[in-house]
Structure formats: structure tokens, C-alpha cells
Image (cartoon, coloured by chain):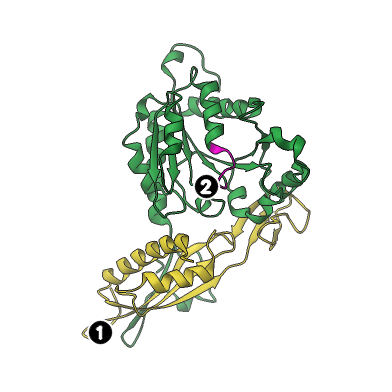
Chain colours: A yellow, B green
Amino acid sequence: MLPVHELSVCQALLTQVAEIAAGRGARVVERITIEVGPLSGVEPVLLASAFAIVRAGGCAAEAALSIESTTVTIGCMACGAHSNPKPNRLVCAVCGGFRTRVVAGDELRLRRVELRMPESRSGPAA
Amino acid sequence: MCETCGCTITPGNAHMHGDQNAGHGAVINVLQDLLAANDQVAVHNREHFDEHGVLAINLMSSPGAGKTALLEATIVALRDRYRIAVIEGDLETDNDAARIRAHGVPAIQITTGTACHLDAHLVHRALHDLPLAGLDLLFIENVGNLVCPASFDLGQHRNVTLLSVTEGDDKPAKYPVIFRASDLVVLSKADLLDVLEDFDPARAAAALRALGRDTPMIRTAARRTPAMGPWLDWLEQELAAWRPAVWTPRSQIGAAVGV
């Protein structure tokens, strides 16, 4: 089954990566690292499949994709405590409070891009 | 330096940050949301809505939960008091937009082809065909899907998700992202509760409450024995609470407007 949702997310990812590479005069991307949280609405396994399709023909055609999974962290609006609950039970583990903020776990972020710089360059990238 | 901000730099990892050159490689630390481009267009859409005093509501649910039926009943109830328009999202057909237009209200159909959700860019294009200056309330009926629409900001002010009583009462536990993103959950087709043994509204409410936002849940019936009171009340409260901050309707210029 074609992961349609993850395809459009990967297209957005590769657009950002291409801009970063072009901005530094690099034509080859070696590795892309992204952070995906359980509450992001995106499934890492499907994202990896979509990436293999979408990267074809561009600067990231040979790039490896590293997916760092984050942990759901909530802050309780009653007692202030942080806890790490399951994604569908966002209740404070300390006081049982039912009003919480999601502090981590909903990320869908480009974390790092590793580029191969052209050989004529020396010294730090601009 | 990180492309966006240095908030994750600590004394322990500071040596890893900044562009590094290992031979002919460069490591660029980014920290940018993948949906940033969509979010920028969404902000732009929201500015359009605010500029024209339009309250925009994103309506989501699984296919067949009754979004279009709810909108039809809403339009019939409110069209003499508020100027309403609808943006419809479906993979194919303009059936839903045609149903809305039959009630005398402008409706723009977006057919996404294969895309499982609306995004801000598609909505932005539809806005060009809507008389925003002459509207009070815009409903965006999203593609029927409990997974993908939750991730994409369209520029709306409120998210409303329908859960029909013919679905499972554990849906909020199965689809936490969309239900947590909702400002209101509507239990639709509630007139069928009499004949459905399996759906327990209390279980659905508990599953919703366990998502940590204290989201209100109200019942509606849009067809056989209509019950629209709480939904219409919620809509009017939202309109009244929101509009004075942004725009005074012509009919109220010169009159006291309570906030």
C-alpha cells in the first residue's frame, strides 16, 4: 500500500534538505536525521518507505535516513509534574490530573543534514 | 549554529553543534519542523480570515460520520442570521459541495485526487473563489479520515471532530492525535442510541478525557429527529466570543457590543 500521507511529508522534507544543500554549494546529501514523535500523526516505518521513493533523482538520491523516535512527555497543569505516558492516556502520573500540556512527543522535525562538500572547498562552510 | 534556534544546546553537547567539517563533509544542525511550509501558508490563511472577520472551523471525522448532513442542518438553522460558506474536501466528486449549494450557500469543492487530507495550500487557492468580505462563518469539511487531517494546519480557528454512534466508543483512544487536536467533539447520529446497544457515550467521554484537554463532547442528530441545540449554541458562543475582538458587524455599529 502506498503511504500517501508519508509521501507528502517526505516531499516537504526533501524540499528543505535541497534548500540547505544548495545554500552551502553541496550537491550530495549523505545522511538526513529526523525526529518523529508518537503524537506526530506520522508512522516512522511508512516514512522510511516513502523516503526511498521520494529521494530518487535528487541531491539526496543516495542519502541514508536516520529516524530518532522521541518519547511522549506531558506537563501537568495542576501539579506541574512531568511524566511519560502512553500516547492515548495523557494523564498526569503523579496527581492523576486530566489537563496536561504535551511537552515532547509530537515532533516531526528535520534534525540534521550531512553533506558531501565539493573537493575544491577547504576550510569551514560559510 | 542551529538553523532555527539553539534551544537544545547544553554544556554536554555544545561541542557537537555548529557546522562541522570532517574531510569533505559538513554536518548542518537544523531543528526545523517538516511542515513549516504548510504552517506558513496556514498563518497567511488565518490572516485573511481575521482581516475579513470570518470564523473558520475545520470539520473532521471518519468517512460517513455525518459531516455534510450536520452542515446542511446547520445552514438551514443559521442562514437567516449568519452568512455562511463551505469549503469541501474529497478525493473525488463534487457531491458534497452540490448538497451545500442546494441550501443557497456558496460551496467550493476541492478534489484532492489521492491526497488523504486538505492542506493550507489547497485551502488558500479555494479562498480566492470565496466572497470572504461578505462572510461570518466558514466551514472547511476535511477529507473523511481520522489520521492525516490532524497534522495539517489549514488556518482555521477551531477544530471540530465528529464521532458517530455507529462507530466504536473507543475511537478517541485509537486516534489520540486528532481527538486531542479538537476543540469540540460532536457525537453525531445520537438519535440512533436507542437502537444501538454497543455504543456507550460515557466510555467515549472517558477516552476523550484521558487525552488531557478536557475537550467538551456534545450530541447531535441531523436527520430523522433533529437535535441541534447544543451544537448551535456552541457555534453562536464561538462567534460571539471571537468577533468583537476582530470585527464589528455592520448591523451592530453604533450599538453596544458585549465582550
Q: Which residue ends up furthest to the top in the rendered image?
A: B254
On screen, residue B244 above or below A109: above
Q: Which residue ends up furthest to the left in the rendered image?
A: A120
Q: Position of residue B127 (x, y in %)?
A: 35, 37
Please name the residue shown 73% across and 55% down the image.
A92
On screen, residue B24 above or below A77: below
Chain hosting mark 1? A
Same chain for the residues under marks 2 and 1 in the image: no
Location of residue B30 (image quadrant): bottom left
The kind of secondary structure the magenta stretch mainly shows is loop
Q: Position of residue B55 (x, y in %)?
A: 47, 32
Q: Which residue is mark 1?
A: A122
Which circle marks residue B144 in the picture?
2
Using a 10 Å C-alpha cutoff, classify the residue at mark 2 as few (fewer than 14 neighbours), some (14 to 19) or many (20 or more).
many
Q: Residues under labels 2 and 1: Cα distance?
A: 53 Å
Please name the residue shown 28% across and 83% down the image.
A123
Q: Amino acid at mark 1?
A: Ser
Q: Position of residue A105 (x, y in %)?
A: 59, 62
Question: In terms of depth relative to the viewer, which is nearer, B96 or B202?
Answer: B96
